[in-house]
Every structure is written in structure tokens, then in C-alpha cells.
Image (spheres, grey):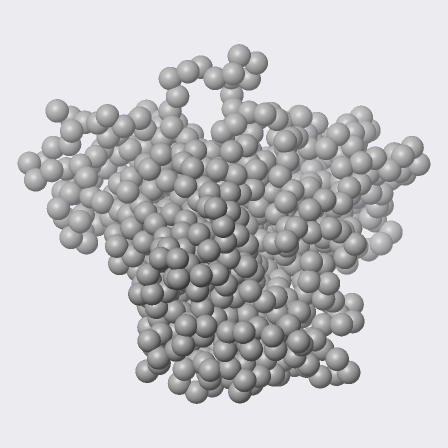
Amino acid sequence: MITAAELPLPHRVGQVNQRLKGWEALRWVDGAPRVTDVLRREVDRFGGLGAIYGVLRADPWSEVHWRNGIPPERSAEACAAVQEYVVRNGCGVPVLFVEEAPHGVQALGATTLPVNLALGAGMDVGLTEELAAAVAAEASARGTHVALVSGLDVLRDPRWGRAEECFGEDPALAALLVAATVRGMQGAGSGPIGAGRVAVVAKHLAAQGAGIGGRNGSGAPIGPRELGEVHLRPAHAAARAGVAGFRAAYNDVDGVPCTGNRGLLTGVLREDWGWDGIVMADGTAIDRLRDSTPDPAAAAALALRAGVDLSLWDEAFTHLGEALDRGLVAEGELDRAVDRVLALKRRVGLLDGPAPVAAPPAPRDVARLVDRAARQAVVLVRDDGVLPLDPSGVVALIGPNADDLDSQLGDYTPPRPADDPGASTVRSALVARLGAGRVLHAPGSRVRSALGPDALAAVGSAVEGADVCVLVLGGTSRRGYGDEFADNGAVAESAADTTNGEGVDLASVALPLPQLELARAARSSGKPVVAVVVDGRPRALTELAGVVDALLVVPFPGPSGGAAIVGALLDGTATGRLPASFPVADGVFPVAHDERVETARGYADQRRPVGIPFGSGVSVAARVHGTSWDITAGELAGGGSLRVPVAVANTGGRRSAVVPLYGRRHELGVRPRRRTLLAVRRVTCEPGESVVEFVLGLDELGSWATGRPVAVPVEIGAWSGDEVDEPGGAARIRVTDEGGATPWQR
């Protein structure tokens, strides 16, 4: 078994480096893969590579597209060409192939899923795991070993452009879905990762969603309790599921950069949690430590000693030899990182001959999963009796997102193929259902800007000839091949209509004025108006809600999102719930449903901060069935649990529905959060009343103040209704001491 001690120093430095961008290391030339001088120089310098990023990546930043990229069916051949060169010309240690997979592998022809925020709206743990398994099988068949997967970030500020990469604002929901993702992609447990699976590096650790003002990579000025209860809970779930790695974030926590935070990367992950995978730095994050270190060698030493094992595009980690010579880092610390990288290579089967490969899943089977996820992402916020639409009527279809596939896809999406039969916009899906003659389309405006008087006149004509008006509004994470990008792939200067994605943080989350003008024009017609907001972040929708008869919210639902939305309009299939709270007005923050109870009265000009709370969505009625349950802290710590039934009343036909269980913790000396999500399940409800039973254990009832669950005596009010504050008569759950008491009662 090869170890760091057997490798010369330059080769060890090479094993912790991941400097290369794969599209620069290999080109597709005359129908075949060709390694470049960029790869040759790197192998000559370091005797090999720890990992190589993005050999298959295709998007505007990489400038890879269908005309110059690797054909999907020959992806494994391209990776094999790189591997053969590295092994033959280096020290013989194979290289890890790493690809981005924020919502599907970012490669030509790969399946594009709804974004994480859409999966958060679906709140379906089982489906999330199935989708992750399908993505892993695709990635593995193409030669990929490691997938970089979003899911740790918790959405605490809707101004943040990367809101779409979060499962939502609630840490319990994020923990459930990120654990499902890890299980689906890697398989269960922390053992070998077999055929059809890939290793997961979960990102971003930690508290990137708490950046000041919603600005990407800005500091998170939070205390240890907030860090533990909100931002470490998803990471703990991933670690417990056996995740292969974590990606250290750009931001600092209380002034300490995550990439240089030994207390986080070593103290929490390894010493407290007992986790033993690799930590990868985010792209150029070690180089960014230059603001807190004097030179590249010092930055490299700071990151290595903190617990970073593998760099990404950084120059600083190439200075580790210098850092050793200057005594900034010990040789044993370098060897420890190298051995962790080698352990990951061993776990995916690279050091035992060729890594196992399995056939990818049938495209039709994957498409069914993706379509189901898109349908579950549709949230019906309000309906004043206009839905479902009359299929014999004429529809005026208005808005910038009505016939724009890109507006459904989200950031970090590979280009779609020219032949794309499974894709649908709202317009194409509505025409397929009703016929072209009964769909009168007029975009009316761009996402952020007006189109002019002629466009508004066309809106008026369409509305006049219709029975109902459907507005499809919102945002877009569109990236163009002419855009400019930062050194980490984030958009540097967003295009005029881009409103979402990395690098597109917004000072205002109000719906753009040109879109509101479309809604006002539709309202003035006197016809029924339905608004569908397709977006990747919460918006202030109070004004829009006041001029429409029905409101649906759809986080970027993926390529089949048009058909999913039309199904909700015509068939009443919307079953999602909001994964994040929407502010009542622009500038009113924070708004998360689990913010702490405030003693202040709020803003003088806006007393009600939340416009539409987390969990909103027309659904079945639910109530906790019972009044009180007790368990001792000792029993809870030892694996004990409580079973809490929730009665569900379904007045319609058989349907899928999300059933939540909320709680408010009453701990002596701790200001409570208004409401937390104790548990949630998507179930199939038969007509009438049924019972859903929740099993509540340490995760659900314990304290997360330290970043892992601890059993402490506490009293919890529990309910399943839509109330944001604990209602009178809420059921009581008591975690008691051995004497049967809680500090709340004494």
C-alpha cells in the first residue's frame, strides 16, 4: 500500500495540488483527445497530480461547447488519455478526475436537474437520493471519480446570488437532503465507493450563506451557537453519511478564513466528529489567504496546518517545499495530507487497478425522475378560485420567462443540445396542451429592462383576445459565451438581464419594475390573472400578489420545468412548499422562519418582515394528534426516540403532499427561535383523514449549539399548521432529566 513516505518531496507536493483546469490540459482535436503542454509541464514538475479538475466541464467560462467539446459518449476515452499520460510519465500514482455537479454533471449531454432550491421545495428525501444516484452513475461511466456537490450552504439572505444552490433556509431540511445526496452518489457508509458511484466533496464549509449583506464570500459575523445550530448541521449530516470530502469556503467566520481555520477543519471535523476524509480548498481560496499572510509560502502553510489537504487552482500550494525549508510547516503535516489524498484514491479503487465502471442508467428512467422533481418544485402560494384553468379557454401568456428555457436552468449548467426533445418552456408546453391558436404569447419585457411601447401594445392585444392572463416572471442565471468571468468562474460583469448565480448578488430583491408593469397592465384588463414566478432566490412579491388572482413560485425547475408548470395550471398538480421565506418588502431582513424571537418591535415603516413564510404552499391540513410526550435526556442520548403522530386531512383525491412538524425550543437562558423544522415528510395521502407518524430522535430533539446533536433537558412546543409562531394549545415534547423535570419547569 503506497504511502506519502515512499514519495520524493516534489511528488508529495504534487499529490496535494489540483492546479490545472482540465479543459486546458486536454483538447479534443480531429476527433480524438490530445494532452497539452500544460499537462506535460505539470507532470514533469511534480511527478504526477493529486487531482485534475474539469476535464469534462462545458460552459461559457471554460469556453467549451458542442462544437469543440468532448463528445459525451467518448468522455471516458478522454479521461483515460490523461490518466495514461500521468501514470506513464509520473511516479505511477493515478490522478483523481474531479467534476462540478451542482445539479447534474457540468458536461456536454449530462442530465440537468432542477436546482437545489427546487429540490428543497419538493422536500422529498427519497427522490433526492434517487436523483443523486442517477447523476453519480452518469459521472462514473464518463470516468469521473469525484463530484463537487453543493448542499451545505443554508440560505439566510435572499440577496445572495447563490441562493439557488441551497436546499433552503432551514438547516434540518438541508441536512436531510444533503445526507440523501451523499448516500445516493457514494452508496451507504464510509467504505469503498464501488461501480456506478462517485466520491462526494460537499460544499461549502462553512456559513457561506451568512455573508454580510448577502455578498458572496463576505465574512460571516456570527457566534458559535449560530454556526452550530444553522450552518454546521448539514455538514454533520454529510459527515455521518460518510462523505468523502468537504470544500472549505471563501468566507471567514468571525474574521477567521475557513481555509485557514484549524478550529473548524481539524477541531470540529476530525477531532470532535471523528471524520477522516479530505478537505479541498475552494478555487483560489488559498491564494486569497494572502490578505492575512505575508507571502504564498505562509498562505500554503496556514491552510495545510488548518487541515486543507488538496488545493484548487492555487499557486500558493506549490510553495509548500519553501514552507518546509522555512520551518512554517512540518513534514509530517504534509505527509498527513498526502496520505488522505491517497486514501481517497484507494477508496474509489484507483490504487487497485482500473477504477470500477458501471453502465449509466437508462435516459428514460432518469428523465422520469427529473420530471417528477420539477413537478414537486411548483409551489401554489395562493389561489382565489381561478385554478385549474379551463382547458377550452384562450390564454394570454405574458412575461420574459414564458418562453425562455435558459431561465429555468440555473447557474453552472452545460449548454443544451440542439436536439432537446425532453425540454419544455411554459409556452411550448401550453401549446402542446391547448393548441397554438389558444395561446397568445407576448413577452412584454426583458427580465430587468423594458422592451418598448410596441411590446406593451402586443401585451394589450394578447390580453384583450384571451379569457385569462398567465404571467411568467422572475429571474435568470443565464451565462453567455461573451460574458466576462472572474478567476474562479464566477461571472465578473453580469449581462444586462442576468439576476442570479455566483457573482450576481443583488442590493434589491424586489421584482424588476418592467415585470410589475406587465402585471398592472394585465390587472387593468379585468381578466383573471395568474402569476408564475420562476426564480432562484426569494423575492419581495407583496405588490405582485396584490394584483393577481393566483400566485405560483417555482425555483429554477430544470429543462422540463415548462411542462411541470403547465401541469400545475391545468391539472392542479402543484405540491411544493416554499424552502425559504420571502420578505414583505425590499430591504426587510432577516426573514428566515427560524430567526430568534425579537424583543424589538421591528422597522417603524414595516412591522411585518415576512411576506410569505417558509413552508407556504396550498396543501393538505395537518395537526399534531396528541398533547404531550416525555423522554429523558439519557434515553435520547442512548438512541431512544419518540413517535409523534400527525393527523392529515385530505379533502381532494389521492395526492402527494408535504407534511411538516414544527417546534419551538424552550431552554432556560436561551432566546428561542420563532419556529424550527423538527421533521418533514412527503407522503401520498388518500382521500379523508390519515395519520403520518414522525420518529423523533437525537437529531430532531437534541441541541445543535456545538454543531452536533447533544441531549439536554428542554421543553418543545410542537405543531403542524402554518403558524409561524407557536400557537396556543401546541403539543408539548419534554426532554427531561432523570427526575422527570426540565429547567423550564423549575
Residue in front for this viewpoint, 483 or 186:
483
In the rendered image, the vertical position of residue 347 relative to residue 124, given as above or below: below
At x 33% / y 73%, what residue is drawn?
Answer: 191
Q: Is residue 555 left or right of residue 743?
A: right
Image x and y of residue 382, in percent = 59, 35
Question: Which residue is found at the position 24% from the left and 30% from the top?
Answer: 667
Task: Give coordinates of residue 594: x percent, y percent.
Answer: 41, 34
Where the C terminus falls, by quadrant? top left
Q: Residue at x 77, y 83 (%)?
A: 30
Query: Picture quarter containing residue 336?
Result: bottom left
The answer to whether residue 3 of the structure is visible from this angle is yes
Q: In this view, does 504 lie to the left or right of 735?
A: right
Q: Residue furthest right?
A: 454
Query: What residue occupies the far top of the structure in this picture?
Result: 604
In the image: residue 53, left or right of residue 151: right
Residue found at x 69% / y 33%: 511
Q: Position of residue 445 (x, y in %)?
A: 82, 38
User: Count the marks: how many?
Assistant: 0
The image quadrant where one finds the N terminus is bottom left
Give the residue furthest to the left: 739
* Residue 31, quarter of the rendered image: bottom right
Nearer-the-camera pick, 435 or 519? 519
Residue 145 x %, y %: 49, 73
Is 177 located above or below residue 34 in the figure? above
